[in-house]
Structure formats: C-alpha cells, structure tokens
Amino acid sequence: MHHRSIDTPQAAVLRQIEEISDEMISFLRELVHIPTVNPPGENYAAGAELIGSKLRQFGYETHFIAAEGSSEHSERYPRINVFGRMPGSRPRPCLHFNGHFDVVPVGAGWTRDPFGAEIADGKLYGRGASDQKAGIAASIFAVEAIRRAGVRLQGSVEQSGTVDEESGGFAGVAYLARHGWIGQDKTDFVIITEPTNVDRVCLGHRGVYWFKVVTHGRIAHGSMPHFGISAIDHLAEFLHQVNSRLRPSLATRKTSMPVEPPGSRYASINVNALFGGQPEEGPQTPCVADRSGAIFDRRFLAEEDFEQVRGEVRALLETLREKNPEFRYDLEDLMIVHPVQTDPACELVAAISAGAEEVLGYRPALTASPGTYDQKHVVRIGNVHQCIAYGPGILDQAHLPDEYVRIEDVVTSARIMALTALRLLGTE
Ligand SMILES: [Zn+2]
C-alpha cells in the first residue's frame, strides 16, 4: 500500500465529507418532507426553493426555471426547475449534476410515514428517499466538501433539480436541454444522480416504442353475430400473432449492453392495456363489438433499427388484412425513445470508475437500465454524449412501500462524486 499525504486535495475533501455528513442527511430529510408527488406534480415550487436556497447558500448563482409553454405547466401545478452554477477559474470543462425531485405516489403498504424521513437502523425512510432525493443531497454536499476544504476547482460545476422525470421529463430535463441550460456548447459531463447503488455506473438504457392498435368491426345484435364483424375477434387474432410469432423472435435478440437485470437484455413486448366492446361498468346490451384495441410496450435494443421495429408490427397487421379483407385496423405511435449508451471508454466513465475504486477498493460495474430515464434528453436534445447515471440507493427500492436509502451509501456516493469532480475539473 502506498502512503498518501494527508495534505492532498483528495484527502482534505474526503475529511470534509465526514465533517458535513450530518448536515447532508438533515438536508435530505428536509427534502423528503416535501411531498413532491407526480402525478399530479405537487409542491414543486417548495422542492425547487429548498434546493435553490441550499445552492445559493453554497455559493452558486441560482435560477428558477418554470417550464413556460409546456403542456404540463399550469397555475395549479407549476413545473419549476432549479439550476445552479459555480464557475471555476475557467468555464470549461463543466460538470453538471442533475437529479429529479419528483416522486411517485405513495401507494399502499407503508409501515412508516412516507414523508416522515424517519431514521432507523442506519436507513432513512420515505417516498423518494432512494429515487432520488438522496442523489441530490449527495451531489450538492460532494461539491460543498470541495469548497469547504478550501480546494479551488479549475472547471465549473452545475447542479440542477428537475421535475417530471417519472412522467417522461418533458417539463424537466428536456425543457432545460431545449432552452440551452444543458447543451454541448456549455456542458461537458452530466451525472444523473438516479439510484444505481454505490458500486454501479449506468451507461444508458434500451429503447421504447409504445403503440396503439385499434381494430374495427361492424355492430350487430349479439344474438345474431353473423350479421356483424367483431373487432374483438380481430384484436384477438393480432394478439395471437404477437404471442406466437413476434414474441419468440424477440426472445432470441440479445443486446451487448450490460443491462441489469440480465433478463432484460432481450428485446421484449408487453400488452399494457386492452379495451373493446361495452364498458365494464354498467348494464350490458347484446352487441357485436365494433371497436377494440390494445396498447403495447415494446422495448428495443441498441442493435435493433427502429424502422424495422415498427415495420414488423405493421407486417403482422398486414398479413392479417391480406388473409381477411374485413380486418381493418389503425396503428398509432404513442411514444418513441431511442436507446442511448455512453462510451464506456470516455473520460467521464474513466473518472468515476477511478474515484469509485479509490473509495470502495474495487472497480464499479458498468451497467445499463432496462427502462429509460432523463439521459435520453441530455443526449438527444442537449447533444452531450458523456452522460451517466450514478447515485446512492438501490433501484429495486424505487417505487416500493417503505422506500429507504442507507445513510452510509449516501455518504459513500458523495465521496465518489467529490473525487470524480476533482479528477474531471482539476484543481488550482
Ligand atoms: Zn428516478
């Protein structure tokens, strides 16, 4: 083992993390206390204000950015993001930490107060504790430890707290990227502080294609169905095609991305919703259904071409129409998200891997996510390609009752974030 002098900037900063860890956890508790529930997007102004006042106190120039003009932004539920900038001795490189402060609804099954931020057995409980208010606290205090250690960074640090990640991020990170707050002409590196566990770095995510298929028939009396055409029967035929032809083919396609869990390395399709005929509630009258449909969630791989992904759905529908001219349908795209993956050999991944190794004693695993998060907006709109997710908390905990984050993990990831910032931005 080599001996490191106590006077290195790294050692001084790590000492400061110990000094301010209680302060970090009490800030995290304050943040968990604010029920920033999405939907509908409650208390966003209070969440942004708490983060913004902390950033201002820690020397950042701070801006509150309302997502004016976006459909989600309303008087009742304003979409307020917060952005802070701490200039270094030069503007570049610029490291941007982003965290979303919206949380999913509480749901049933809690044995703790979901917004009580109770601490027991080294765990802090609350909705959003893991996903991902702990990440926001860790990144703010990681950089504060550098400042309190008296270490001057050469490059600049930015932090943003954003809304609506859980519902697509359009009034959050997408809005910031679209309006130039995050972008290739000013931002070099982005760390999204989603829960990846302390020893994993997430490089990106698979693609998403949500689509709706509606089948059409002809209404008739249910006692004489031969006079009608059942849209439900048509839909059933399509579902059969999906299950017997598409699904087995998808199960043979595997990505080389290190998606966790490994079962999600395959292309997949899920029926998210099904409708047709008369509404379930209320009395039924005998009718042949003239309209039916389903909503599908197709996850595609970086190795798949999107036009082919959509094309094979269309081809299945066309096959049915050729066999039966009465088979009429509409195919509608609901959402398309392309896969993203940061180059594992880039400077950002190298820096965080080295920082993690210094703190943990081993290299972190490089992974990819089965579902998407705000990285898509950073990469696709902001054109910033060195973007990863890294933060405390276990992803499996996200959205569960009795969500918690281990306090030791928050401190550990703050250490790793601080060493990463030192390495990427350089010191005076
Ligand atoms: Zn999240």
Image (cartoon, rainbow, N blue to C red):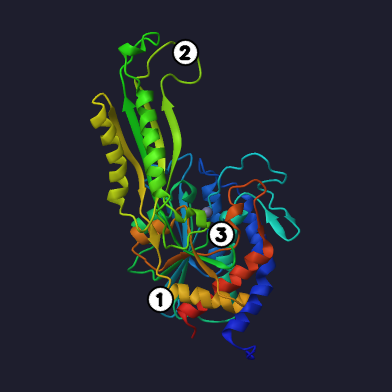
Q: Secondary structure at mark 2?
A: loop
Q: Count the marks: how many?
A: 3
For marks 1 and 2 on the same chain, the one whose residue lies earlier in the sequence? 1
Which residue in the protein does label 2 denote?
A: 284
Name the spot of residue 74 as percent of width and height, x first. 43, 41
**Does mark 1's beta carbon lie closer than 8 Å to ligand 1?**
no
**Disc 3 versus disc 1: nearer the observer:** 3
Residue at the image point whose x is 44% and y is 31% from the top? 274
Residue 237 shows up from this direction? yes
**Does mark 3's beta carbon lie closer than 8 Å to ligand 1?**
yes
Q: Are marks 3 and 1 in contact (CB under 8 Å)?
A: no
Which residue in the protein does label 3 denote?
A: 195
- Quarter placement of the N terminus: bottom right
**162 vs 5: above or below:** above
The kind of residue tagged 1 is Pro
Q: Considering depth in this image, is 290 or 84 the residue closer to the camera?
A: 290
146 on left or right of 255: right
Q: Considering depth in this image, is 323 or 137 the residue closer to the camera?
A: 323
Which residue in the protein does label 1 denote?
A: 93
Residue at the image point whose x is 49% and y is 80% from the top? 423
Q: Secondary structure at mark 1?
A: loop
Label annotation for residue 167: none
Q: Residues within 10 Å of mark 3 (few under 14, many from 20)?
A: many
**Disc 2 versus disc 3: nearer the observer:** 2
The kind of residue tagged 3 is Pro
Name the spot of residue 193 as percent of width and height, x first. 52, 62
For marks 2 and 3 on the same chain, the one whose residue lies earlier in the sequence? 3
